[in-house]
């Protein structure tokens, strides 16, 4: 949302803010659950229980349609595939005949990935910072929205025994209240969807009781959102001695769920915690079943797990996830390098009855938290979405009141772009000291990932790396007070 719109929203009384949310939910209702939804619901219900062979046939039919569109109507592929016999790709097994697609190519040539004749203003825009902190703009045809949400309903919610019609709570990244808010309510209620939207930026041991009472008062029966936020709330409740609240299920996504996080959620909310995998690019999706095995969802896209040289990994061997979306016929992403890592499970038979492939060792979504002086744990900050000129970024926290925003500048970058990110972060979490440091590269993990948040406390193995980087780049430090 534009800054002026957020400022206007924040100035409204709570009841008017909730009225605005309800009106917006009505608009989304028509897009998500309107024309095409029931048809898609039926199609994906059948696909969810299909054999692997039947699901592969469905995927290959969709793949043919996507490839035909990409090769003939999308400028980027038409140029890049001049020397490629794309018409020989008849199934998922043939995809290695096509080149892999990097995120930076999408970022640099955004408009060239759109099917000719489509005005971007007529499309649905998704923005994602991704696990590298790199801003991407992904366009969906509006006709894809009911398909996507039908798939979510069938392959995620129903698996967990919940659904759109059941009252729920959401712990996401939207700044629904000011970061400086010092008293409840730390939430807003969307009456149309019976959705309690909880701020993930105000969770602490001191506020836990108020959060949990809100869940009780509004009748929330399941919870969804970032795994880091859900576990932070659950652990805060446990630490504060709040009476546990029994829910039907927790469905989390957006960052890696550790065993400790899962234990906090399942202990406090007395329900199973299901991890799911997806992204705004909408090229693949996966969901845990009751046996905690992560099944690929055939309706979203085709998944490959590859070595660095592009060859397929053996079962149990960790490699990069490369995915081909099957629903977006306006901005198709083919053999898209996710930047995430996983392995095919060595045992592909599951007691839940789902025959679709099983992923394990899913890596790449692990973000650390900012830990504030008042005890709040802030994970999965999405502020990087607003600055596409920033190639990649990372928050490096060295004290409870201070962090560096490490920025690798991209095309057309200016300092004000990074300062806007700092402002966005403070809008969400309140007063906090930030310094911008422009760096040639963001330090990567052992697997080549960039964590969005790194805390130096208790991490001696990282001290030398970051101290050296800050020393080299000290002339580019700008206060963002």
Image (cartoon, rainbow, N blue to C red):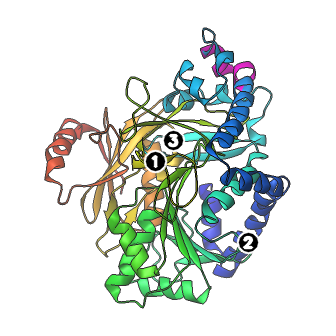
The residue range painted magenta reads 70-80
- Looking at the rendering, which quadrant does residue 313 occupy? top left
Q: Is residue 314 visible?
A: yes
Question: Would residue 443 be found to the left or right of residue 428 on screen?
Answer: left
Q: Is residue 203 visible?
A: no
Callout 1 secondary element = strand
Q: Which residue is mark 2?
A: 22
In percent of width and height, residue 328 lies at 70, 39
Q: Please tell me the numbered disc located at residue 135.
A: 3
Callout 2 secondary element = helix
Which residue is depicted at the point 44% across and 74% down? 202
Mark 1 crowdedness (10 Å alpha carbons): few <14, some 14-19, many ≥20: many
Q: Which residue is mark 1?
A: 359
Mark 3 crowdedness (10 Å alpha carbons): few <14, some 14-19, many ≥20: many
Callout 3 secondary element = loop
- Name which of mark 2 and mark 1 comes first in the sequence: 2
In reply to whether residue 77 is colored magenta, the answer given is yes
- Name which of mark 3 and mark 2 comes first in the sequence: 2
Front residue (pair 251, 217): 251
């Amino acid at each position: 949302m534009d800054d002026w719109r957020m400022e206007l929203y924040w100035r409204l009384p709570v009841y008017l803010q909730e009225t605005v949310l309800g009106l917006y939910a009505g608009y989304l209702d028509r897009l998500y659950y309107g024309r095409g939804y029931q048809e898609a619901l039926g199609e994906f219900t059948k696909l969810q229980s299909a054999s692997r062979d039947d699901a592969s046939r469905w995927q290959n039919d969709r793949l043919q349609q996507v490839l035909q569109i990409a090769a003939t109507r999308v400028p980027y592929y038409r140029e890049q595939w001049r020397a490629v016999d794309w018409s020989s790709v008849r199934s998922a097994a043939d995809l290695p005949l096509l080149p892999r697609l990097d995120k930076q190519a999408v970022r640099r040539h955004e408009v060239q990935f759109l099917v000719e004749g489509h005005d971007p203003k007529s499309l649905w825009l998704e923005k994602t910072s991704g696990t590298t902190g790199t801003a991407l703009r992904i366009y969906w045809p509006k006709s894809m929205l009911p398909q996507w949400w039908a798939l979510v309903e069938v392959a995620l919610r129903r698996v967990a025994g919940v659904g759109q019609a059941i009252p729920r709570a959401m712990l996401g990244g939207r700044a629904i209240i000011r970061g400086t808010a010092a008293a409840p309510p730390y939430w807003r209620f969307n009456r149309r969807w019976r959705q309690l939207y909880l701020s993930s930026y105000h969770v602490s041991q001191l506020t836990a009781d108020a959060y949990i009472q809100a869940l009780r008062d509004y009748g929330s029966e399941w919870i969804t959102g970032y795994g880091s936020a859900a576990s932070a709330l659950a652990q805060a409740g446990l630490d504060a001695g709040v009476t546990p609240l029994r829910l039907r299920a927790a469905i989390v996504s957006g960052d890696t769920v550790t065993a400790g996080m899962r234990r906090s959620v399942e202990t406090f909310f007395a329900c199973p915690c299901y991890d799911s995998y997806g992204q705004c690019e909408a090229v693949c999706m996966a969901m845990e079943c009751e046996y905690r095995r992560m099944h690929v969802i055939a309706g979203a896209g085709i998944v490959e797990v590859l070595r660095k040289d592009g060859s397929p990994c053996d079962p149990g061997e960790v490699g990069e996830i490369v995915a081909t979306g099957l629903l977006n016929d306006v901005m198709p992403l083919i053999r898209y390098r996710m930047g995430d890592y996983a392995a095919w499970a060595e045992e592909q038979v599951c007691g839940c009855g789902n025959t679709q492939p099983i992923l394990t060792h899913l890596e790449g979504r692990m973000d650390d938290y900012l830990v504030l002086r008042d005890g709040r744990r802030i994970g999965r900050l999405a502020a990087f979405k607003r600055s596409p000129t920033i190639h990649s970024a990372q928050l490096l926290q060295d004290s409870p009141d201070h962090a560096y925003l490490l920025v690798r500048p991209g095309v057309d970058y200016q300092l004000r772009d990074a300062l806007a990110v700092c402002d966005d972060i403070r809008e969400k979490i309140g007063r906090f000291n930030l310094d911008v440091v422009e760096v040639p590269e963001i330090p990567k993990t052992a697997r080549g990932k960039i964590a969005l948040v790194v805390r130096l406390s208790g991490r001696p193995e990282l001290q030398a790396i970051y101290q050296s980087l800050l020393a080299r780049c000290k002339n580019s430090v700008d206060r963002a007070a």
